[in-house]
Amino acid sequence: MDKYVEICGTPIEIKSIKDYRIVKKEYIFRPVFREIPPKNFLSSTKYLFETMEPYASIVDEKMTGILRSKVKKFECENAAGRRMWIAIDEVPVLVYHADGHAAEVFKNNPNYALMGKDKSASIEMIEALVIQAKEKYIFYGRNIHLYSVLDGYNKVKEAIASLDKKKEKKDKKEKIEAANAGEIEDVKKEQAVDVGAYAKNLLGKVKNTVGNVKDTIGNKVESFMDKDGSSDNALSDNDVNSSNTETVAESNDKTGEELKTLKIQYENGEISVEEFNLAVNKLLDNL
């Protein structure tokens, strides 16, 4: 129920609340009398005024009748939710009889005249909590719906604040997770750049190795020719270069293939960057 706030037994979805405030609303109050039984057969029944009680809230009003006979009538809604149109002098008084039961007495009842002059209903302005959500809710004070309208207002306020706090906490968590995911992606990109650098470095060393081998072979051939004074019994430069270059080329091709395999394994997540670095170092040591 943390998604709802309950006011006077009515659950209201918190996130659907668009507005809430305390306002003054018109409410009809009617008199309440208590029956006083006659003391003897010579005396008559009397009615003692006790209080004014809430009868119904005013929703709308209109004038009915013709010319001087026009009467103002009010559209009202009682505490049970029943709506009706009624004039203020048509509101019945409530009488508690001597036997304990209560009854409404209308102005056409003979006992109505026995209530005295102070039996008219009245209209009073009272505080009400109005909440606009998926539908409009009105909760009246004066213990009609709420004992304290302000307490009901603060309850709604705290419920909305609590929901906003949870939402803010959730949004913050999602932002942190998104930021962390972004950092991980950046690290992967940096590692991918490192892999490219390793590849370029390795290919450079392979090329340098091929060049060094060629230079070494050439130097050895020249040294051999100088020592012997003749090239008749020596291998030709083309033969030597061809033989050793083929060997180096094979080594170069093999190293290149191994590097490609390592790169594919890393990109597919089959090996970690540490494993990739270790394998590359081994290749470099074997050049």
Image (cartoon, rainbow, N blue to C red):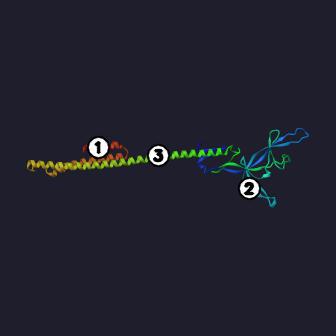
Q: Distance between the residues labelled 2 and 3?
A: 57 Å
Q: State the image coordinates of residue 147 (x, y, percent, origin top left).
A: 69, 43
In the orientation shown, which residue stands out farthest toward the left?
229
| Amino acid type for the residue under numbered disc 3 | Ile
- Is residue 232 left or right of 93 when viewed as pictured? left
Q: Mark 2 points at which residue?
A: 61
| Amino acid type for the residue under numbered disc 2 | Glu
The foreground one among 208 and 241 is 208
| Amino acid type for the residue under numbered disc 1 | Asn
Q: Name the residue under label 3.
A: 176
Q: State the image coordinates of residue 25 (x, y, percent, origin top left).
A: 70, 51
- For the C terminus, the quadrant is top left
Sequence-wise, the earlier of marks 3 and 1 is 3
Q: How packed is label 1: few (under 14 Cα within 10 Å), some, or many (20 or more)?
A: few
Q: State the image coordinates of residue 200 (x, y, percent, origin top left).
A: 29, 50
The answer to whether mark 3 and mark 1 are in CB contact below 8 A is no
Question: Tag 3's secondary structure?
Answer: helix
- For the N terminus, the quadrant is top right
Question: Tag 1's secondary structure?
Answer: helix
Q: Mark 1 points at which residue?
A: 281
Q: How far apart are marks 1 and 2 (CA)?
A: 93 Å
Q: How packed is label 2: few (under 14 Cα within 10 Å), some, or many (20 or more)?
A: some
Question: Tag 2's secondary structure?
Answer: strand
Quarter of image, res 158:
top right
